[in-house]
Amino acid sequence: MKSLIFFAFVTPFTLFAADMLPSWKDGAVKESIVSFIQKAQDKSSDAFIEVEDRVAVFDNDGTLWSEQPLYFQLFFAIERLQQMAEKDPSLKKEQPYKAVLEGDMKTFQSFGEKGIAQVVFKTHAGMPNEEFEQEVAEWIAKAKHPKTGRRFIDMTYQPMKELIQALHAAEFKCYIVSGGGASFMRPWVEEAYGIPRNRVIGSRVEIEYQVQDGQPVLMRKAKLEFVDDKEGKPVGIYQVIGRRPVFAAGNSDGDFQMLEYTTAGKGARMGVLVHHTDAEREWAYDRESPIGHLVRGLDEAEERGWILIDMKEHWKTIYGEE
Amino acid sequence: MKSLIFFAFVTPFTLFAADMLPSWKDGAVKESIVSFIQKAQDKSSDAFIEVEDRVAVFDNDGTLWSEQPLYFQLFFAIERLQQMAEKDPSLKKEQPYKAVLEGDMKTFQSFGEKGIAQVVFKTHAGMPNEEFEQEVAEWIAKAKHPKTGRRFIDMTYQPMKELIQALHAAEFKCYIVSGGGASFMRPWVEEAYGIPRNRVIGSRVEIEYQVQDGQPVLMRKAKLEFVDDKEGKPVGIYQVIGRRPVFAAGNSDGDFQMLEYTTAGKGARMGVLVHHTDAEREWAYDRESPIGHLVRGLDEAEERGWILIDMKEHWKTIYGEE
């Protein structure tokens, strides 16, 4: 008993570390993260962080769950379009919906960004927000990934969920700051990550307040009101949090400005980039990939002091329970 | 001792009530509010509210602090314009600034809403957001109201601060949802109300992410990006909270939709309107006043079950320590 107390006294960080991030392999990356969290709580440390400043921000696609071969929100859009086409067969004759419904991606791509916007608005707008979130909740409960056969919600990264838990235990407030739709994420982030729905910052369509038959409704309009990507991420953080985070995690150049803004502040800061290096257990991509495009982050991580998380090297498991 | 326990057992609500809202006079209004808060925590009650749904929203001007004879943010704008004119005397010759600097309100009003926008943008935009908030913090620490001689921050309503405290004690999350500027309020709401700066929803100018000499900056632009008033309030709540509140407090028709949206939900709900009836201790105004204009709220409060708080009748003190 006595020796145990002594041991706990001299090596508290190492001791806690083993519990804090069990899915992370021991090494410099894990030690840096654990040390950051421990020192943030240690008033005698130079890296102590006041509780109200303990704000951590996480990108979602490719940082907290997978994003290949398409952002998962696009699988939702396609499945929803299929449902809509069953009720309204005219969609099967109308482009660009016809191409999507026939799985003719070449024709679909010929419509460019406008085609994507049309499919997204068709499936994400024109209904009350509550109804949309209900659709998402029903989809996420059962929808599965075509390649892995896992439910999308079970393709969330176990090591990152442990990191969020460790930050929560250290009184950090964790926010999701994603290019995905805020209303697409809110229905399931609590279940998936233990992050409450009010800590979600995402892209938004315009919302119009309407009163229908005496009932107030937040109607989703076919217009992008805010794109939470690149320079938009620090702006979204300003809008919703109003405080500069001290910790930021991303995986693509869409997260560059969020990490830049976060780590440029005074005092202890940490920026991490999840590097997709594991073609066997997940996917391997970076510079050449249109999804999760990562060039500037790779080139500048070292000089900026950002940590590159090598999925293959640093994580014992990707999704847990493999 | 035994009788005290018995007493506490049979009348817990009344017993707590005395402590919870000491600046509120006893009566039906106080009882309704106390009962709402108590039942929200009582699992055996029909009016129980799950902790994650305990979201309360408060307008600021006229609901948590005074707003006469001008919104206090306009006093800030005028004083800041005066400071700017000392450094840049050309402003003294240029309209509409000249009129404001000379206190010539008649001429200023002749420029209409465009004139107000010009003064607001001149004083609220064109600088990094951090710098702007610093200006606000310095101003609020000492600026005083021309009529009362009190600091503006000491013209916050003691009874409403007790209400916020009581809601916090009952695990409610309290947000400010104001037509005023989010960045104007964030620097001082924690000190004034015990509400953290990340729980402020307000109007916003456009923010542009810039990197200046390697340092990221959130630059304030001379463009209104979001007006958090009327139909905008439920939209701002959607953007930042993503959850329908169960309690809403306002004082003008600018708060109508926020109360409507809040109280139309299922389960226990409460909407309250602060009615300015006290010309002696504060101000008396409603239907005819351009500031704090209240017509529809007065006409429909009863049928909608909203509580009218009569400042003169229901509050023992306005600002405390009178």
Image (cartoon, coloured by chain):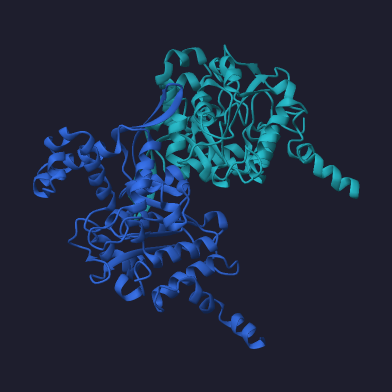
Chain colours: A blue, B cyan
Q: Quadrant of the C terminus of chain A?
A: bottom left
Q: Nearer the viewer, residue B218 or A64?
A: A64
Measuring 78% from the left and 28% from the top, which residue is drawn there? B26
Q: Does B19 sit above or below residue B252?
A: below
Residue A42 x, y percent position in the rendering? 58, 68
Residue B4 point in image, percent of width and height: 88, 46
* Vertical arrangement, residue B120 with respect to residue B197, above or below: above
- Can residue A51 be seen? yes
Q: Residue B256: image x %, image y %?
A: 52, 23
Residue A64: tell me if it is visible. no
Closer to us: A228 or A299: A228
- Res. A263 image quadrant: bottom left
Q: In the rendered view, tell whether residue A171 sits above or below residue A18.
A: above
How many marks the image carries: the answer is 0
Please identify the quarter of the rendering in which residue B161 is found: top right
Q: Point out the image quarter for the N terminus of chain A.
A: bottom right
* Residue A173 at x, y percent in the picture: 50, 55
Give above or below for A262 relative to A228.
below
- The residue sitting at the front extreme is A86
> Which sits in the foreground, B228 or B129?
B228
Direction from residue A166 to residue B205 in the image, left or right: left
> Dividing the picture into quarters, in which one does residue A313 lie?
bottom left
Report the side of A77 relative to B221 (left or right). left
- Viewer-nearest residue: A226 or A302: A226
Please give the name of the residue rendered at 24% of the width and 46% of the height, measured from the top-left corner. A79
